[in-house]
Amino acid sequence: MDGPSETQGIRSTEENQTNQHENPPPPNLLPSSQPLSPAAAGGGGGASSSATMARIVSRALPFALRSPQPGAALLRSEAARCPPLAAAAAAAAPAASMLSWRGLTPTPDPSRSSQPPPLPLPPFAGFLAGIRGFRRGRRGQSAARRAQPQDPIPAAPPPPKESEIELYARVSIDDDMPDDPEVLNIVEILKLNVPMAMKIALDGLLDSNYKSRDTSISDVGRYDKVEVSVVLCNDNFIQNLNKEWRGEDSCIEMLSMSQYIPDLDVPTLMLGDIVISVETAARHAEERGHTLLDEVRIQAVRGILRLLGFDHQTSDESAVEMEKEEQLILKSLRWKGKNLAKSVLDSGKSQTETLDEQVTSGLKRAGSLRFYRPKFKYIFCDMDGTLLNSKSQVTARNAEALREARSRGVNIVIATGKARPAAIDALSMVDLSGRTGIVSASSPGIFLQGLLVYGLQGREIYKRNLDQEVCREALLYSLEHKVPLVAFSQDRCFSMYDDPLVDSLHYVYHEPKAEIVRSIDQLLGTAEIQKVLFLETPEGISSSLRPFWEKAIEGRARVVQAQPDMLELVPPATSKGDGVKILLDHLCISPDEVMAIGDGENDIEMLQLASLGVALANGSERTKAVANIIGATNDEDGVAQAIYDYAF
């Protein structure tokens, strides 16, 4: 094995010394002197009768996070040292060119063995068999020395000085991606894997007979170094890059951009850049039943082939030839790939499937947020008409989006006109309540239109009550006009009489079941009222109920309408947005770190306060007018789409 100056061009001297103490180097490996057939070599030689053999040394690289060091393999060329039985064959046949691993095939000594040299092996088979053969050879040599100590073995002549051709793979991660452990591990593996794939791909260029390949790059022998860049990214990054490079506004799994300039006399061959979306690769890996590493390796091989002149998009013949070369490389390296990729043509297709496999532009799939950094620390989300659909249920997709956002470090805070027990009950249906959910008796939250605010550990930090005279007038109006009314007092609800609409608040909207109190004085003496809610038809509210109360309570309370068939009276100068501000101050959070999602007029101040306000398409016109973004409806998983598209 060469000394540190030859094989460790990336690490510092101190780092090399440290690694030598922690991980002692393997025993010296002798260079191979056996010729390889053109079939095994995968490349043709020149007219000279002396064969030329190139070798690779892999480099162990230090672990890197945001600034990964380039992986490299070292190619060395030297005059082949052929044993007697192979010399005649080498003279009679054209010289074979082979990029092989340093020290991975044993060097037979003619003075110690009369056996003919073993048959040549394919590149990677030679790699594995060479290791095993070398170890067996070492044990055999040791035994021979023990058996015949009087017969010293003459030292082998020093090998001729070798020229170096280095293969570099600079592997990095897009800065917008978080530090995902699996992706970081893949980066370290690719630093060694990509030069291995480059070695095999370059090995077959000289005698390649593919008709569709661009042969501009055919012989790398005149270069000191061959370099390629590999970037792992998410779908957003590669879609923007695809639009910039190719003018196509779509997401694909892999892009390659050549940097090769013909006839440029420089010591380094810059093959180009390979960009791989690990987000799309993860989806394909799941669909095809293999790991993310397997899929990324496949895409790296395809990228190398594209940079070397293969292009599956030009014709059916070119697709077949590229597929053939791809499989040769994957098989040589013992990497998965056979029967996993449907076709190389799949790599050019847009990948925007939703959970139900329907194509929907711009909508990420569940599980994809791991490849994105969150843009906000907090998401404040309304419930009725927003998180809840028209059946007052949290859909599976909305629930999955909330879980995934929470798992990525985003805090979800419920900001609703409901009582806290109602929010807990609705979210318990999808296992999002309790200490492990997003709402509980010990979590922050904003309830009853911002009139009740709970901070850390679920502690009450703000409460505002409705004026008692306004409450009395509303209760009298309910009795006289037979308009059902429910009074809210923290976690309890009260009403003056039974009514199906009152019951619907409990059975449909999850509110606490209303307690019937026949006397107004008794009701007002029982509890402090934060708000009252009338239940009426949308027509009745717009034509008579709202105009009446806007005039009757002017200055003493304000009218709020979150649902078309509900009208609420709340204290003046209060709003859900005020509750959000109180909680943000309590948590020491800036509105710049907040995204808010709502639909009703009661959400206007909250959307205005947040850095990004998203109004769902089913919301009121006034609400949509102040929002930054108009999302999908609450029956189209509008919350999930807002999280996937704008929160990360």
Image (cartoon, rainbow, N blue to C red):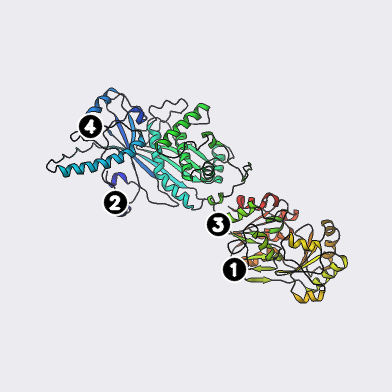
- Name the amino acid type tagged 2: Pro
What is the number of the mark on residue 395? none
Q: Residue at x 42, y 36 (%)?
A: 331
Residue 425: x and y in percent read: 67, 62
Q: Give the crowd class for mark 4: few <14, some 14-19, many >=20 residues within 10 Å.
A: few
Front label number (3 vs 1): 3
Name which of mark 2 and mark 4 comes first in the sequence: 2
- Quarter location, residue 418: bottom right
Question: Where does label 4 land, which residue?
Answer: 115
Task: Identify the secondary structure beneath mark 2.
Answer: loop
Residue 50: x and y in percent read: 27, 27
Question: Where does label 1 land, which residue?
Answer: 456
Q: Residue at x 26, y 41 (%)?
A: 136
- Name the amino acid type tagged 4: Gln
Question: Marks 4 and 1, Cα distance to the nearest angstrom?
Answer: 80 Å
Name which of mark 4 and mark 1 comes first in the sequence: 4
